[in-house]
Image: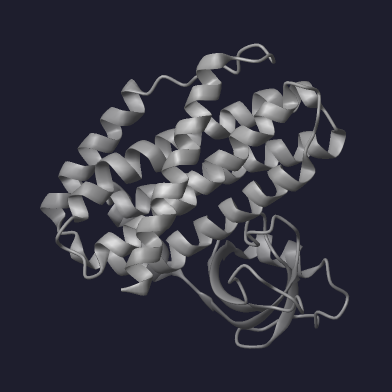
Amino acid sequence: MTEKILKIKYTCLHPSCVVFCKNGELLLPESEFARLSSAHKHVPEGFNQGEEALFKSPRNACRMGYGQQFKALSVAAAEDENAEAQSEENSPVKDPIAHLIAEHNKVLEKVERVEEHLIKRDIGGLWVSTADLDNILHLHGGIKEEEILFPALSGLVPFGEGLVACINEDHREIVSLLYSFREALKDGNINDKIIGSSLVALKSHIRKEDNEFFEFVKKYINDEMKEAIMSKMELADKTFAPKEPGERKFDEKEAAERMKFHEKTLESREIACDTCCH
């Protein structure tokens, strides 16, 4: 028998949440919700649907990357939503927006590896894990979003140019900080401030895309566009060649590439500023 999936509406009880995850909705297996609920002593025994309960946030629910205390506002069975999701997955027309949202979980897995190496102060591990993060950010943000999705939205989405400029600015800032951190690693330095800023910005960016940007633009993409966009994204997956971490030493070519990213960051900021101001 298939385990029941629960649809849980929650609010975060952290007093100073700054990454827009105060309220949300989760789909969790019943057993997983029970496990997370048992982490808090004040959960009433025999929790019934509709009652309020405290539970620990599941993995990756908080974009800051830490386990938080969530309060369940409502809990209901989600068989219909689950069946609909399975039906959509089996549909010949796949959804590029759903694909990008799902890929965010892969990005966050790379972030976790970086954070694990930071805790261990493992410079060698950081050199590899930050390269892995750079690769997936290039494939996901640089190719699938900037080269495939955004051009397809051109002229279709109200204020689309300004929205895309803001997303591109985020991409440039995150990757520029990541490059700066890797540059410091070459000298044997672990710059916590730079990598911390990059990871916090990345998690906030993902939340912004999932809950705001993608929710806004997906209504402008019809089935024909979905098929064409997905075809290009699948080709990108097949042809993408990830960069090796390389040796941890000064590289003139990488330095020039970092400079290009810094220039694009400034350019994107100017475009976003002009859009916001006018």
Residue 134 lies in quadrant: top right
Along the line of sight, which residue is nearer the eye, 126 or 87?
126
Along the line of sight, which residue is nearer the eye, 219 or 49?
219
Q: Is residue 111 above or below residue 206?
A: above
Q: Is 101 left or right of 15, judged from the image as shown?
A: left
Q: How many marks?
A: 0
In this orientation, does residue 176 appear?
yes
In this orientation, does residue 94 appear?
no
User: Residue at (67%, 51%) from the top-left corner?
Assistant: 197
Image spot of residue 50 (x, y percent): 60, 87
Image spot of residue 173 (x, y percent): 53, 48
| Colour theme | one colour
Report the residue that reaches farthest toward the top.
247
Q: Is 158 left or right of 180, judged from the image as shown?
A: left
Report the residue that reaches farthest toward the left.
224
User: Residue at (83%, 66%) from the top-left corner?
Assistant: 39
User: Residue at (44%, 52%) from the top-left corner?
Assistant: 169
Along the line of sight, which residue is nearer the eye, 168 or 228?
168
Q: Is residue 18 above or below residue 200?
A: below
Q: Is residue 27 above or below residue 126?
A: below
Q: Is 165 left or right of 170, judged from the image as shown?
A: left
Image spot of residue 141 (x, y percent): 41, 43
Which quadrant: the C terminus? Answer: bottom left
Along the line of sight, which residue is nearer the eye, 221 or 85?
221
Q: Is 155 left or right of 50, judged from the image as shown?
A: left
User: Residue at (19%, 59%) from the top-left corner?
Assistant: 221
Image spot of residue 102 (x, y percent): 45, 49
